[in-house]
Image (cartoon, grey):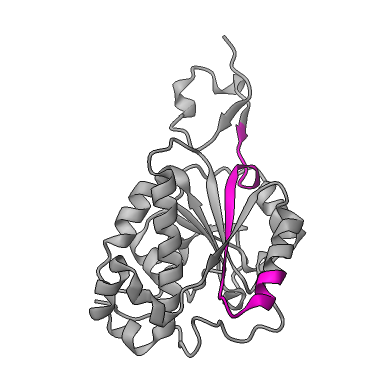
Amino acid sequence: MILKNIVMMNLDISPMFFNNINNIDIIYMNIYDNIKEIIYINLEKRKDREEYINKFLKEYFNHIKITRFKAIEPKQAIKYPFIKEKIKHSKNANQLPGITGCYSSHICILNRLFNKYKNKDTNDFVLIVEDDTQFNNNFIDKLKEPLNITDWNIMLGINPSCNVNHNGINKYDDFKNEHIFGTNVVIYNLKNIKRLYRDIINIPVIIDYDFMLKENIDNIYFFDTKYIQERGDVKISDIRSKIQIKRRLWW
């Protein structure tokens, strides 16, 4: 029996299962067609960015549900029980409240995704976008390309200033010694959402969300920086202002 057109969708299917691999056409899924929803992070006071990012996303993803997440100001973070206790033990978060704002917005989105998808068997993804982010058709084309990476947890669109252009999509472990940062774009693999949330929420302190992911979560990938831009009028992130980004010990 000859099998054709097997779709690789994060499934635990090994080509070794088949006797004759030459008779199999493996069609890899792409990211774009499997994005379940899009969430953009936007501060209440930045109505200008909300108008921009909402219009911008609808241009490229008009068939996908797009939701605004009201970004959390650092002083609002203590309203969330799973964040409040961490603040007490987070030296860097107390000294640089912008870290708390960035962390709180992203962790609350992750909490929402966990509660929504934890009991669902899905091979879909969720795309998170910060409201100062830009991309063009090149990024969309990249999302539409067949994805031959089947074992991944998170994909990041890192800060353009990192200036890394290598494989199109790169495994973070191959760049551990390079200065790579930013959560301009975050794509979660919902198949692994329960384990992701458990591992992230159990980290006892608040740290830069991007570094926390990279230091504690395996199978993280990031896109070449040529695919992600920031708006020309953006100089410093609202919720991460006055942060000097550098590698440091957290606990």
Q: How many marks?
A: 0
Q: Is residue 29 magenta?
A: yes
Q: Is residue 7 above or below residue 103?
A: above
Q: Is residue 2 above or below residue 185?
A: above
Q: Position of residue 105 (x, y in %)?
A: 45, 69
In this view, the residue in front, 189 or 238, is: 238
Tell me where residue 41 sits by quadrant: bottom right
Residue 177, visible in the rendered structure: no
Q: Position of residue 51 (x, y in %)?
A: 70, 70
Task: Write the residue at 37% across / 53% down.
Answer: 196
Image quadrant in which the C terminus is located: bottom left
Q: Which residues are magenta?
A: 27-51
Task: Write the residue at 73% across / 51% down.
Answer: 62
Q: Residue furthest top?
A: 1
Image quadrant in which the N terminus is located: top right
In this view, the residue in front, 171 or 55, is: 55
Q: Position of residue 221 (x, y in %)?
A: 50, 57
Residue 65, visible in the rendered structure: yes
Task: Write the residue at 43% across / 32% down.
Answer: 12
Tell me where residue 28 sits by quadrant: top right
Q: Is residue 80 above or below residue 36?
A: below
Q: Is residue 31 magenta?
A: yes
